[in-house]
Amino acid sequence: MKKNYLIILVLSVFVFASCSETESEPSVININNDVRDSANIATQIQTLNDAGAFYNVSMKILNGTTPIDGAQVKLTSSVNGETIEMTENADASGNVVFDGITVGGNFIEVSAEGYYSALGIIDFKFERGYNYEIIDGVVTPITKSETAIIPLYRNGEGENTAKIKGQIKIETDVTNKVSEVLKNKLIRADFSGNIINVSEGLTFKEYSLNVEGGLGEDLTDDNGQYEIIVPTSQNGTQINLIIPQLQVKQKLAYLNEFDEPVLDSVLTTFGTNETSSSIPFVSGIKTIIPEPAEPGAGLQVTNIKKHPRRLFESGSPYYSPSSNQLFPGGSIQDMNKMKFKFQSGNGYKSVPEVVIEDATGANALVNAEGEYAIKSITLDSTGFYPSNTNINYDILAYYQSSWGTRSYYIYEGSVITNNSGEITQEALDESLEFAFVERDWFGERYRHLSNGEVDSIKINFDSYYYNSSRAYGTVDYDIKVRMLEILNPGDNYIDPSISFVGGDPITPATFEIIEFPTPWTFQLDNSNNTSPYVANPSINIEFLIDGTYDISNRIRTDETTYDFVSQVIKSKDGNIVFKENLDYFTYEYSIEQPEFYIIEPIHYKADVQFNIDENTGEINYHFDYNRGNGYKERFEVAVEPTFDEISGEGASFQVIGGSKYGDEYQWSGDLYIKNRGSGYVRNVNRINSRSFSISNDLSNTYLYNGDEVIVNIDYGTGRR
């Protein structure tokens, strides 16, 4: 039998390459980072190794405990790309000594007349502190003398032999429940465990007998059976099996990148150290359901127009405002669904009237409320009073109520007459000086009258002798618009304006409507349809509010709000129409005409998943479904095996339930099983994932003459 080996020895500090046929330069040696001038060190070590400075090996060749005189030991290694062979013969004590062995992997062959020759591999430990030291950049070798006792076995089947037999199984087809057997595969015995007293620097492996179809190996037969005859010694022989790693095709079902079931032969690796891959689930049946109709296309939204709204809205559309008061200010204000700028004006002689204009709007009612400030009081008559006397006066605002004309106290004071008994303008101004600085209703300290609007403001002086002697004055006061009170928010406004009339102001009040967003009405246009509709399209509405574009699906009527346009439309004779003859408009308000985006329907094929009784092969219920869409009528459901070579037949079903929405039949997922069928499989892959296993571990077992051991090997399902 011809045997080929490729051995790579990985050392803790250095890596030597072995058995290279083309290498002509010294092998690359990697040195720890703490060694200075590592390239020079590597060269030194390589030179020392080539000279065999690191290892001597002594071996004793025995038959049991008996030395084998003349046994030949051959070591083969590679140095700088050249094959080096060293051969020595054992002395009468069975001893063989090799001096100057190079590190890098060595094959060993041991033979003697009347014995089975044997082959193996020797690896050498190699690391700093064990094999060498580095002192001041100079490598000093530590020559090691290693030892080992190596067995040989006499020729002769049936004499001093034991038997190892068993069956080898492997899962090369996971779509059936029967395990396959490994045919025509060589199984060999490993005698490495019998090499004893191996010193620290040596490792032996794969020590096997070098025979053709005889002792120590066997080919598995058609049933996967093998039977190996192995020689034994009087002290017992420790034997393991050399179990080959395999790469073979495995029949397997799986789902491809498109989730489609595929039945194929997949290259799979089997061996002692292979972790088995999971076995995928692929349903043993496929559901047969017809395709839905072609999706409709071409719908347009046209005739988009503003929908009238209230002049004043609340935070939520279609409700009265939560606050019925608007106050002036210098910046742009936002009353929920309207942006405006409201300036109060000044210099009014009376509170102006609020005028609202719109082409379609009606019923909005807004009152202006004024606020007042006295600017000056002019003395019209000095009066006749005693000289140098305090004369009291009151300043009152007069207004109308249900009780008639009423007055409101603003201020009281007194003024001193002059030597002539007159009230002078200068004295009056001096008396009012405090009021114009500190008191409401004077100067710029405007105040409003909560009881009503002021008709007039007057100053009343006390009389002293008689009324004709009373002083009189005129109060000059200013009026500006304090606020607007909303009495009725109105209806049906589209493009309103608000202005102020009357009052003869110096600076008129203004109310500028900057943004007045509205809902929008629209119609459905099927005139350009390119294919008839069955399922509804989706309609997204892009609107502009507060400077931001946003998307909504909501629409409403005067009575009801709908979260999606699809709730109010349906297919009819291939067109998309409103379900009811109502006035529909957008729920959201928009400053400009909104965009309507038609998302054409995508029809999905219905699907249903069935559970299969593993024992009977019957379909006993369905556990998952996809209702699909775009079907014009109820459809048929059938099943068949996923692949032609998979079993199962006879099942039949009836779709039940569902509803009709326009032209579309919408399945509810209900199904009646008329016939459960038989012979179906739940999973095309019938075998569960299984790791490599062996029935009898021989690692701690010694065989003696006549022993028979059964070792069954199961490669499992392998790794893909």
Image: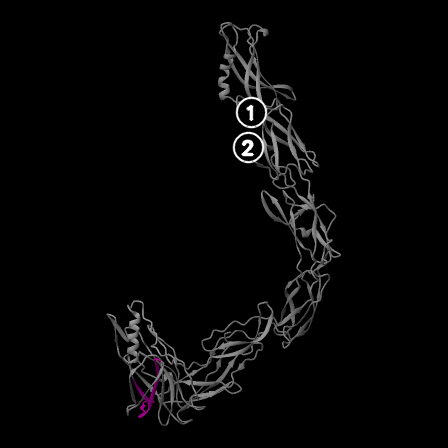
Q: Would you name the residue on which mark 1 appears?
A: 447
Q: How is the image coloured?
A: one colour
Is the N terminus in the top left, top right, bottom left or bottom right quadrant?
Answer: bottom left
Residue 436: image location, x then y, percent: 51, 20
Residue 280: image location, x then y, percent: 55, 71
Q: Is residue 676 visible?
A: yes
Q: Would you name the residue on which mark 2 appears?
A: 330
Residue 281 vertical placement versus 572 (above, below):
below
Q: For residue 614, what is the image quadrant?
A: bottom right
Q: Is residue 449 visible?
A: no
Q: For residue 638, what is the image quadrant?
A: bottom right
- For this rendering, which residue is in front, 95 or 175? 95
Q: Tell me if mark 1 has few (under 14), some (14-19) or many (20+) residues whose alpha carbon lies within 10 angstroms of its own.
A: some
Total numbered labels placed on residues in the image: 2
Residue 431: image location, x then y, percent: 50, 14
- Residue furthest to the front in view is 24
Residue 93 vertical placement versus 662 (above, below):
below
Q: Give the label, 1 or 2, closer to the camera.
A: 2
